[in-house]
Every structure is written in C-alpha cells, then in structure tokens.
Image (cartoon, rainbow, N blue to C red):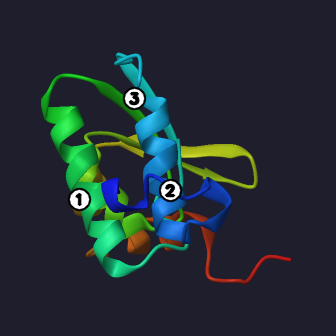
Amino acid sequence: MEKHADKRVQRFSGGMKRRANIIASLLHYPQILILDEPTAGVDVQSRAMILDFIQEYKEDGKTILYTSHLLDEAEKICDDVVIVDEGKFIIEGAPHALIHSTDDCNSLEDVFLHYTGHSVRD
C-alpha cells in the first residue's frame, strides 16, 4: 500500500479500504482481533492476502473473532465456529467435527443448510 500513501482513504478501492481497516486495527497489537466480514467485496488477491494474514496472526497465538457468510473461509481458518440463524444459537464446534458428525454433509455450508433449511429469507 506504500505507493498509495499520498492518497485519501476515500479514493481507495474496496480491497485497499479493507486492508487499511485491518492495519488500523493492529496498531496497538491487540491480543483479540474482531473482524466482521473482512473479505466482503474484495478482489481475489485481496481476499487471499487477508486470509493469509489472519492465519499468520492466529499462528502467533492471537485470538480472532471472525464473522462471515462465506463458510468456506470459516472452514479453512477457524478452530471453532458457532452457527447463528435469525439471531439464535444453532450449534458450535470445530468445523471438521461438525461436518463429520452431521449426516450427508461435506462442508460447513452443508452443515449450515442442514440446521437452518434451504428456504430463502426476506
């Protein structure tokens, strides 16, 4: 992002804004990092960079509270997940444990649909 140091944040792309937000959240080296859909609306390269960073931060022993509708991301980077539907706790556990303990499920998305149904919400 150094080549954009002279730009105003308002002129950044969506991916650059997300990266700037993450950088700002890390200025004080927090032990707990709360990220609300950090990869929403970013390009493939920014998404990969953000997910790699999250994995590295986690490997440094930091705690990350991560919310996302992209369950493939949660399946890859989370040690523990909580599925919430319409504001209600549904189930909690390690992603792979949830997948293996739920009939006919091959992914966390399958688990989510198993417990919440397939009907579209308004």
Q: Quadrant of the N terminus?
A: bottom left
C-alpha span from label 1 to label 3 = 22 Å
Q: In the visual, does 5 lie left or right of 37?
A: left
User: SS of the residue at dot 1?
Assistant: helix
Residue beneath label 3, please?
26
Q: Which mark is on residue 18?
A: 2
Residue 105 position in % (x across, y down): 31, 74
User: SS of the residue at dot 3?
Assistant: loop
C-alpha span from label 3 to label 2 = 13 Å
C-alpha span from label 1 to label 2 = 20 Å
Q: Which mark is on residue 76?
A: 1
User: SS of the residue at dot 2?
Assistant: helix
Residue 30 lies, with reference to residue 14, above or below; the image says above
Residue at image point 55% right, 69% down: 14
Proximity of marks 3 and 2: CB atoms separated by less than 8 Å: no
Q: Earlier in the sequence, mark 3 or mark 2?
A: 2
Query: Which residue ends up furthest to the front in the rendered image?
Result: 6
Q: Amino acid at mark 3?
A: Leu
Residue at image point 41% right, 16% down: 28
Q: In the visual, does 47 lie left or right of 40?
A: left
Q: Is 58 in front, or is 88?
A: 58
Residue 66 position in % (x across, y down): 45, 43
Residue at image point 29% right, 75% down: 45
Q: Amino acid at mark 1?
A: Lys
- Residue 109 visible in the current orientation: yes
